[in-house]
Image (tube, helix red, strand yellow):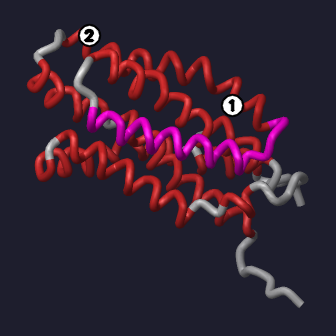
Amino acid sequence: MSRKLPIFYGWYLVAICIISMILIYGIRHSFAVFFSPILEEFRWSRGDTAMMMSLNILAYGLMAPIAGGLADRWRPRVLIFVGVILLGVSTAGCAFATRLWHFYFLFGFLMSIGTAFSGWPIFAPALMNWFAKRRGLALGLSQMGGGLSFAYSIFVEFSIRSLGWRYTFLAIAVTNNKIEKRYTDLKRLVSRSNAP
């Protein structure tokens, strides 16, 4: 006989989603903290450097419906795994970038795909399968992670001051991937296809 959890398991998934959203979207939202050190090192124009963020948001906007559509066809856990890997590789890759087009490709394009495939377009339908009642509350609480991801910049700022911007990109890539592996229970998140 299996032991019943004292709290409905869907609420644990909401908590996991909040943590994951902070980590996943925190990388993009900490761009402002990386902006000045990158400008100082490469002396590119502000507009050319800021284009990284514009490309990131544009590519994410284009990829989110594709990721959501694939979540209807494929297992979300596979998409999240691919997304987390792409996000980690692109973030770590930024540490080795030396040309503007490197940042455009890594931060502007590849990171956006990783974010779309490991973020809200995948979490939302998976969470909806767990909640027949209080679905709106569950989705609203889960979105808190997106808002709290702006606070991730505090960690990034401290890291840049201690390690420099290149090592910070590496540190957040490793940290995010380790935390995602440990706390995101992907198997259970998608094990049910219907709400209870």
Where does label 1 land, which residue? 67
> Which of the image's four quarters has the N terminus?
bottom right
Label 1 environment density (alpha carbons within 10 Å; few <14, some 14–19, many ≥20): many
For mark 1, give the secondary structure: helix
Numbered-mark total: 2
At a point 43% along the width and 53% down the height, the residue shown is 176
Mark identifier at residue 77: none
At a point 66% along the width and 35% down the height, the residue shown is 121
Residue 4 vs 192, above or below: the answer is below
Q: Position of residue 134 (x, y in %)?
A: 76, 53
Q: Amino acid at mark 1?
A: Ala
Residues in magenta?
72-96
Label 2 environment density (alpha carbons within 10 Å; few <14, some 14–19, many ≥20): few
Q: Position of residue 106 (x, y in %)?
A: 40, 27
Mark identifier at residue 48: 2
At a point 17% along the width and 45% down the height, the residue shown is 160
